Image (cartoon, rainbow, N blue to C red):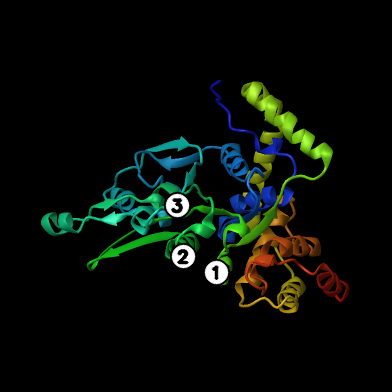
Amino acid sequence: MKRNHVYPFTAIVGQEDMKLALILNVINPSLGGVLIKGEKGTAKSTAVRALAQLLPEMTVVNGCSFHCNPADESTLCENCTADLAKGRQLEITHRKMRVIELPVSATEDRVVGTLDIEHAIKCGEKKFDLGILAEANRNILYVDEINLLDDHVVDVLLDAAAMGVNTVEREGISYAHPAKFILVGTMNPEEGDIRPQLLDRFGLSVVVGGEHEIEQRTQVIKRRLTYEYNAEEFHAAYEAAQQKLAAQIIQARKLLPAVQIADELLVLAAKIAIELNVDGHRADITLIKAAQTLAAFDSHNKVVPADIKQAAALALPHRMRRRPFEESTLDMQKIDKLFEEM
């Protein structure tokens, strides 16, 4: 039977941490993506595709290979910028956010794109063959089994995710294009680990597993079978919940820039990072960004201590010192003690 509907995000049973981490990155892409660790068959890819379908259509420049945002001139590609400079009006259209999948076998050229040097020499103009990062601009870039990806390719992905720009240089010729995307990586720790330096570059991380409560597992079975029998009817049953969550995300995006945080909570975040023996300052900064995003998602314009505590569980575990293949867990007693000392 042909299905016209992706499995609804709000119909996914359990996996609350994973769903929350994905939502926070959609609200605030500057968080730096999410790394999802766990066994297969735990709705990882389902959740990513469902989230993209949940969101409203975005405005893009019609015909632009990078789906530029016409409302933000600072992120336009070279072609769109040139059109504006010539006084041309950018034609707009609307489209859904997409999930771009990056295969484990992808080479660096396939990811970043390539410059045609021969064409540049003969014609005196740049010719750029698009890579996966061009497709990923303003979309979700999904990398399954990211721990099996070549380290150098992972470095390129994380650099582009942090900078929002992909720059390709060959033989003294360079080309840059916007590459703002939400990076979602998944991995099974039993199949290999990721270098700590790369782990630190992911904004948030979660560990997922199969449901162990009989009632929850039964719900997973029922909902999946119902969806496969009649996807359209199943989707209609969750339409109200989908619209409610989508509206909450849109409102959170608007509220986020106005969310305030007191200095005492900045101090608390620093104390938590020190107490948990986290290296560097990226952890502290991500912790604060995540707390602000949580506040916005809850329709608050001010961060409260509970936001810091919840954000710590998402932003810190993968940054804690550990032995290879050892799973990091937060010592909540240490964190609770710091809260008591406030």
Q: Residue 72: give its label.
A: 3
Residue 151, label in figure: 2
Position of residue 330 in the picture relative to residue 51 (left or right): right
Q: Residue furthest left?
A: 122
If you read the primary sequence from the N terminus, does the residue marked by circle 2 or circle 1 appear first?
2
The x and y percentages for residue 276 are 73, 75
Q: CA distance from mark 2 to mark 1?
A: 8 Å
Residue lying farthest to the right in this orientation: 340
Using a 10 Å C-alpha cutoff, classify the residue at mark 3 as few (fewer than 14 neighbours), some (14 to 19) or many (20 or more).
few
Q: Is residue 268 above or below residue 46?
A: below
Give the image location of residue 226, x and y in percent: 69, 25
Asked whether the residues under the numbered discs 3 and 2 touch, taking CB atoms below 8 Å apart as contact, a structural biologist would say: no
Q: Which one is in front, 138 or 337?
A: 337
In the image, what residue type sits under mark 1? Arg
* Amino acid on which the number 2 mark rests in the picture: Asp
The circle on residue 195 is: 1
Q: CA distance from mark 3 to mark 1?
A: 35 Å
* Residue at 81%, 71% in the rendered image: 335
**How far from the left and from the top, in percent, is residue 88?**
30, 44
Q: Secondary structure at mark 3?
A: loop
